[in-house]
Amino acid sequence: MRGLGLRLVDAVKPYALQIVLLIGLWWGFSATTPLFTGISSVYAVVEGFAVLGLISVGLLVPVLAGELDLSVAAMAALAGGIAVRVAGLGLVPALAIATLAGLVIGAIQGGVLSRLGISSVVFTIGTMLGLQGLAFLVSDNAALPLEDFSVSDPLLNRWSFLSPSSLVAIAVFGLVWFLLACTKIGREVYAFGGGRREAAAAGVSQLRVMVVAFAVCGGCAALAGAMASIKSGSSTPGGYTDLLLIAPAAILVGGINLDGGRGTVINVVLGVAIISVVRSGLGFRGVESYIVDLAVGGLLLVFVVADFFIQRAAGQRSRARTARRVLTG
């Protein structure tokens, strides 16, 4: 039993700060916000995984490879327009077509980045502008409504604190976890982000890693935008710009370093949950959206500073132990 307890502690330890923060935020909002109680609060937080969660877990893969995709918000907007345009084919075909478009565009981005060897930040700023322009083109420079609103009916169902959108997001989280933890390409993504020269020397294909990483990211962003647009009954070409900053914030709050090579899907789950609790809790209090964004930014700054001091203290303890071993060796 003691060994099992120690293993459990070791498993939870990397996420301790996020878990404490999540529990503290939930308790604080539950104690101060009467509406933030019961199933409604759980539903609001879990529903945050349908858009923010999908985009964040997709963004995780290129981040683990040491890259960053800034085109995710524009990809979601473009996919939303595509899904609404082809919604006459049915809900599942519309989502599939939009997601496939995101996968293909993402794969092309990864392939081009691999061949050119340029910064993904610089390149995806350019593709962000291009995809945003395509989103406006697909939507005729205005909000594009569904022609048949019955297509969105299945997405409006709700079972306790779950919905079709959140269930799809949970399934995608599971698939991304399997990809990273149980497949060869997942191990290659970690190796590539941890040390490119060493990974290349070990035979890891940069092209394969980049194509897969950006394809997953593009597909997740497209699926999120397609589901959200069909569920709301229209697509808005400029409707996801806030996610350009909130999704990376969720990853950082979850404890993932943008240098690459370290992090898991659990980090994303915790980061998205924390951001969703803040946004939902303040939303139940009737706080203006810009105040919510300010709170998320402030939370990110506090967390980054706290994590910096924790990591520095851990490094100092490690160096002290090393020094003692040298002196007593």
Image (cartoon, rainbow, N blue to C red):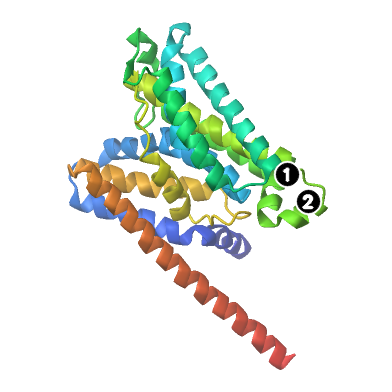
Picture residue at 29% right of the left edge, 40% below the top: 41
Horizontal and vertical percent position of residue 298 = 31, 58
* Placement of the C terminus among the 4 image quadrants: bottom right
Query: Which amino acid does the dot numbered 2 rest on?
Result: Ala
Tell me whether circle 1 and circle 2 mark residues in contact (CB < 8 Å).
yes
Horizontal and vertical percent position of residue 117 = 67, 46
* Mark 1 to mark 2 CA distance (whole Å): 7 Å
Q: Is residue 105 above or below residue 267?
A: above
Q: Is residue 320 above or below residue 165?
A: below
Circle number at residue 200: 2
Query: Which amino acid does the dot numbered 1 rest on?
Result: Gln
For disc 1, the marked residue is 206
Residue 150 vs residue 220, the one in the foreground: 220
Local crowd size for mark 2, using a 10 Å CA cut-off: few (<14), some (14–19), many (≥20): some
Residue 276 vs residue 23, the one in the foreground: 276
Q: Residue furthest bottom?
A: 327
* Whether residue 25 is visible: yes
Q: Is residue 81 above or below residue 90?
A: below
Picture residue at 45% right of the left edge, 13% below the top: 91
* Placement of the N terminus among the 4 image quadrants: bottom right
Answer left or right for 194 relative to 275: right
Horizontal and vertical percent position of residue 258 = 54, 55
Residue 36 vs residue 219, the one in the foreground: 219
Residue 7 vs residue 30, the one in the foreground: 30
Q: Is residue 203 above or below residue 299?
A: above
* Whether residue 225 is visible: no
Could you tell me how many numbered marks the image carries? 2
